[in-house]
Amino acid sequence: MSIRSALMSAVLRRTIKKQLDSLEDVVEFRENMAKAEGLSAKTPDNVIVTPLNIPRTSGASIPCEWIQMEEASTKPVLLYFHGGCYVFGGLNGHRDVAWRLAEAGDVRVLLVDYRLAPEHPFPAALEDAIECYRWLLAQGTTPDKIAIGGDSAGGGLSVATLVNIKNLGMPMPNCSILLSPWTDLSLSGDSIGANADSDVMLTAGALKKTADHYLGQSDHTAPLASPLFADLSGLPATFVQVSESEILLSDAQRLVTKMVDAGGEAMLETWPKMPHVWQILASRVPEGKAAIVKLGEFLKARLRSAA
């Protein structure tokens, strides 16, 4: 563990973890987090960021951004869903990890600002995710040139999207990358308790509150909300990264085990003593950069082999 990571972990424990654990007003917390996103690392001048709106079947369009390293690129696409416990997060806070993945994976990233709870509870986020995938296909992007990925809640949303793509009989994308995915909103994993102290960001209380905001009275083990409990057969090759010290460790471990048991290809990479989704801290900690390099290698190997 680098000195920078140790310092960052100490800061997260004293700030974000305390704020999340005492979370009451979701909208106020979201606004505070949005202000903090303004302090994110500056996007390099050679990164091309293009806002766009993807139409919904009904209602307002979905705000998104193309993030790429080249103009008019025909490179494969990473459809990416940000984290934030389904109640906060957005484009500003994830633009940095998006361009780094675009560079490392030699892809274009379509970063999606899906609807958030409690204003838009389940299945609003999933509906937006499917709309964006449909839009990519309608634009002529072939499934073998598409990867789906996300971090934390966005990682769980990625798996739920893959399950729903299968349920709807749509063509499956090439592969998936998941960063500390939240796949069990019922919080039944062993690490929820075992890593309560070692996790420097998340708490069981915070996850329960935000899961309740997202799901309301819906079943917290519903397969499209908690895809750990879905039929995971027929999903594409998936690469998962998670920290050994976070409370969502069990979510990642059980997901990979179930995917492999269902006949799929899934790989788990655990990192010691890292904060939850340390990849989004790549501008500050070397382990974030190193993890993104590995994610990029997976994307390039999968998408180039398809080409």
Image (spheres, rainbow, N blue to C red):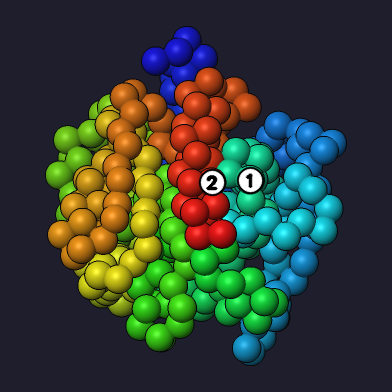
Label 2: few (<14), some (14–19) or many (≥20) C-alpha neighbours in 10 Å: some
Q: Which residue matches tag 2?
A: 300
Give the vertical position of 81 relative to 37 (above or below): below
Label 1, residues with CA under 10 Å away: few <14, some 14-19, many ≥20 = many
The tag on residue 106 is 1
Residue farthest toward the top in the current orientation of the protein: 3
Displayed quadrant of residue 275: top left
Measure how far apart labels 1 and 2 are at the Cα level: 7 Å
Q: Which residue is drawn at 68% across and 56% down?
A: 75
Quarter of the image for the N terminus: give it. top left
Position of the C terminus, as image quadrant, is: bottom right
- Residue 34, compared with residue 209, is above or below; it is above
Q: What's under tag 1, amino acid-wise?
A: Asp
Under circle 2, the secondary element is helix
Q: Where does the image place residue 42, in percent across and percent down from the top left?
A: 76, 33
**Badges 1 and 2: C-beta atoms under 8 Å apart?**
yes
* Whether residue 138 can be seen here: yes
Q: Which amino acid does label 2 sit on?
A: Lys
Front residue of this view, candidates 249 and 195: 249
Return the residue nearer the eye: 276 or 149. Answer: 149
Residue at left offset 52%, top offset 35%: 292
Q: Which of marks 1 and 2 is nearer the N terminus?
A: 1
**For residue 22, side relative to residue 299 (left or right):** left
Q: Is mark 1 on a helix, strand or loop?
A: loop
* Residue 232 x %, y %: 26, 68
Where residue 181 appears, as percent x and y from the top left, is 37, 50
Q: In which quarter of the image is residue 236?
A: bottom left
> Residue at position x 46%, y 63% from top?
174
The answer to whether residue 37 shows anywhere in this view is: no
Q: In this view, does 299 lie above or below 44?
A: below
Where does residue 82 sit, x and y in percent of width and height? Answer: 54, 53
